[in-house]
Amino acid sequence: MDIVVKYCGGCNCQIDRSRIIKDVLSLLKTGDRLTTDDSGAPFGAGILVCGCPSACARKPELDLLAGRWVVIAGKTVDARDLPEDKLAGAVVEKIHNK
């Protein structure tokens, strides 16, 4: 599955966004692919990576890019509080458990 990754502007990061995505990449199934190039839309899934809980990058137009989104907002995944080292695992679980 192709998965698009979108980032917030990074003005108030409380997490290491790039490390979390590297961790997600290492946990994905064979055949899954991450991309930041949204020209291939629509994607099977999207990951919105916001460095803080405000998730200001969440915009309605993102819905056109992917069938479903997993939102990292600070130390949460889809509004569920987690330790930072558990975020990547929760993202991958959400992507594969439709």
Image (cartoon, rainbow, N blue to C red):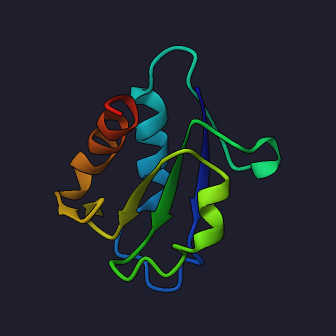
Query: Measuring 32% from the left and 78% from the top, which residue is drawn there?
Result: 53
Relative to 22, 95 lies left or right: left
Q: How many marks?
A: 0
Q: Is residue 37 above or below residue 12?
A: above
- In which quadrant will I find the C terminus? top left
Q: Nearer the viewer, residue 28 or 84?
A: 28
* Residue at the far right in the pictured view: 39
x, y percent for residue 25: 49, 34
Relative to 57, 86 lies left or right: left
The part of the image, by quadrant, that contains residue 55 is bottom left
x, y percent for residue 52: 37, 77
Q: Nearer the viewer, residue 53 or 64?
A: 64
Q: Is residue 60 above or below residue 26?
A: below
x, y percent for residue 64: 67, 56
Query: Measuring 57% from the left and 36% from the top, which residue is drawn there?
Result: 44
Relative to 45, 20 lies left or right: left
Query: Measuring 44% from the left and 85% from the top, which residue is drawn there?
Result: 12
Q: Nearer the viewer, residue 67 or 39?
A: 67
- In which quadrant will I find the N terminus? top right
